[in-house]
Image (cartoon, rainbow, N blue to C red):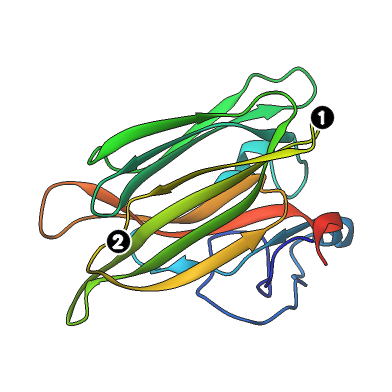
């Protein structure tokens, strides 16, 4: 069962939050449209867009095998998410970092038989009358397919006193997309939003 929602296209820059379930885009081969889905964007759409599916040459090719490590920097908000993916065909692992250097770093390492199968979080404004929009909280659900066991890491940042909207993604996550942004209040980047890619055969 992959992803509660899907946007109307899955290539290029991340999308604004939408509940449209169409995934058709004339610029993406039909077979690729059916193999992978992307969730809506959770959070804001300002700053610098990123899309980690382009690690694999998406949409022409897809060489991401699985996520092997996630480093979350967190304090009052989630400042940064750094993801390392293993790749097929003997290609070297690839690491992508999004956000800034604030907060404390927590490293989550996945074994060869472990997969990221769920993400719970919260996004919104620092307080009701003032921005910026950011990711306030992340919690990761990891399945060991060999043992049939599940572990939960986090939550990272509690979002205490922050007005926010919860989100939930279920199904194997292969890559992230979203926006990170330079703060206007301090010379530091932060993670403004996230979106998630995964295989459509997990979609229910």
Specify whether 141 is left or right of 78.
right
Q: Identify the residue at horizontal 72%, vertical 23% (top origin).
A: 112
Are the two marked residues, 2 and 1, in contact with CB atoms closer than 8 angstroms? Answer: no
Q: Position of residue 156 (x, y in %)?
A: 38, 47
Quadrant holding the N terminus: bottom right
Q: Position of residue 118 (x, y in %)?
A: 63, 53
Looking at the rendered structure, which numbered label has been put on residue 123? none
Q: Which comes sooner in the sequence, label 2 or label 1? A: 1
Q: Which one is in front, 202 or 153?
A: 153
Q: Residues within 10 Å of mark 1 (few under 14, many from 20)?
A: few
- Mark 1 secondary-structure assignment: loop
- Mark 2 secondary-structure assignment: loop
Q: Identify the residue at horizontal 79%, vertical 37% (top origin).
A: 148
Q: In this view, does 41 lie above or below 77?
A: below
Q: Identify the residue at horizontal 87%, vertical 62% (top origin).
A: 30
Residue 49 visible here: no
- Residue where numbered disc 1 is placed: 146
Looking at the rendered structure, which numbered label has been put on residue 159? 2
The quarter of the picture where residue 126 lies is bottom left
Q: In this view, does 23 lie above or below 174?
A: below
Q: Identify the residue at horizontal 28%, vertical 42% (top origin).
A: 100
């Amino acid at each position: 069962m992959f992803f509660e929602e899907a946007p109307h296209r899955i290539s290029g820059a991340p999308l604004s939050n939408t509940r449209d379930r169409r995934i058709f885009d004339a610029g993406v081969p039909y077979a690729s449209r059916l193999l992978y889905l992307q969730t809506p964007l959770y959070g804001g759409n300002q700053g610098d867009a990123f899309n980690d599916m382009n690690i694999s040459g998406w949409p022409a090719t897809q060489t991401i095998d699985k996520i092997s490590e996630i480093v979350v920097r967190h304090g009052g908000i989630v400042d940064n998410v750094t993801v390392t993916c293993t790749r097929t065909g003997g290609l070297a692992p690839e690491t992508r970092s999004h956000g800034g250097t604030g907060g404390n770093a927590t490293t989550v390492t996945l074994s060869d038989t472990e997969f990221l199968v769920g993400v719970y979080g919260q996004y919104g404004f620092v307080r009701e009358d003032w921005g910026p929009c950011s990711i306030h909280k992340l919690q990761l659900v990891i399945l060991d397919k060999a043992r049939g066991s599940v572990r939960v890491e986090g939550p990272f940042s509690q979002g205490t006193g922050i007005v926010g909207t919860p989100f939930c993604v279920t199904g194997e996550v292969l890559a992230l997309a979203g926006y990170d942004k330079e703060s206007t209040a301090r010379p530091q980047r932060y993670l403004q939003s996230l979106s998630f890619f995964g295989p459509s055969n997990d979609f229910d």
